[in-house]
Amino acid sequence: MNRILVWDWPVRIGHWLLVGAFALAWLTGDSETWRLVHVWAGGGVVGVVLFRLLWGLVGTRHARFASFVRGPGAVKAYLLGLFTHPRAETPGHNPAGGWAIVALLSLGLLTGVSGWLTYQEIGGEWLEEAHEALASTMLTVVFVHVIGVLIGSLAHGENLVRAMFTGIKRGDADAAIVNARPFAVPLLLACAVTCAWWLAR
Ligand code: HEM
């Protein structure tokens, strides 16, 4: 099989930005001193997620939701065949990973919005508690996601973490993307910074 480009620049930069912003927001969540950093980081999460939702409609082939959000049957078949059909890896996200991604994007958005409402002192204590519960749920899903990535890497004999840096995986030549769309990265960064600034006002 060939080495082909599957992840465009916005997917890769967006992924690691999301990791950094969520980690920073988590680490500063309990501190009054770091409150503004927490709000900026949370706003950054929302900005990256909003961009990713748009990119899921207009981005390159494997970035599109239509290419990786599959029904329960496909997820079950993938999980059951994980170690018996190790070559059956999809060039983009696999069906199980697709749902982890949907969960992470939804939780990122809900956690950010509930945090912003709490910051604006709208909603009261129950919303603050909901914000904390959503953040903890997101952390749990992150653990599941990382374990899934490691299992997928072992099962398919492919370093998926490295692929999220380089964009390159094994696959048929006709599954490759042609353009890595670097021009969209400034839009992603602008979206993250604008959202962070707007939510922290
Ligand atoms: C805050 C923590 C994290 C969040 C919110 C997160 C979220 C996501 C999202 C949304 C995607 C889909 C990428 C896209 O299509 O745009 C993804 C994919 C991926 N993530 Fe993460 N991630 C996190 C942590 C990590 C960490 C720590 C690693 C590495 C150990 C990792 C490795 C990967 C890999 C390899 C993929 C691609 C999986 C595949 O090949 O289908 N993620 N992640």
Image (cartoon, rainbow, N blue to C red):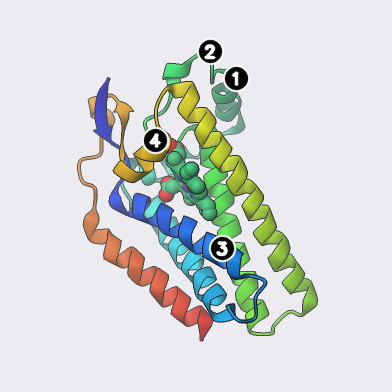
Q: Is mark 4 within 8 Å of ligand 1?
A: yes
In the picture, residue 117 is in which quadrant?
A: bottom right
Q: Is mark 1 within 8 Å of ligand 1?
A: no
Gap between marks 1 and 4 measured at Cα? 19 Å
Give the x, y percent position of residue 58: 34, 53
Asked if the residue under mark 1 is in contact with the one under mark 2, i.e. CB atoms within 8 Å, the reply is yes
User: What kind of element bears circle 4?
Assistant: loop
Gap between marks 2 and 1 measured at Cα? 8 Å
Gap between marks 2 and 4 measured at Cα? 20 Å
Q: Which of 156 and 27 lies nearest the eye of the viewer?
A: 27
Residue underneath mark 3: 109
Gap between marks 4 and 3 measured at Cα? 23 Å
Residue underneath mark 2: 84
Decide if residue 3 is on the left or right side of residue 75: left
Give the x, y percent position of residue 189: 34, 67
Residue underneath mark 4: 92
Tell me what residue is drawn at x 61 percent, y 32 percent: 72
Above-or-below relation of 115 to 26: below
What amino acid is found at the position of numbered circle 2 in the picture? Thr
Q: Using the image, tell me which numbered label, if any, was put on residue 80.
A: 1
What amino acid is found at the position of numbered circle 4 in the picture? Gly
Tell me what residue is drawn at x 63 percent, y 54 percent: 138
What amino acid is found at the position of numbered circle 3 in the picture? Leu
Q: Residues within 10 Å of mark 3 (few under 14, many from 20)?
A: many
Q: Is residue 70 visible?
A: no
Gap between marks 3 and 1 measured at Cα? 31 Å
Q: Residues within 10 Å of mark 1 (few under 14, many from 20)?
A: few
Above-or-below relation of 145 to 26: above
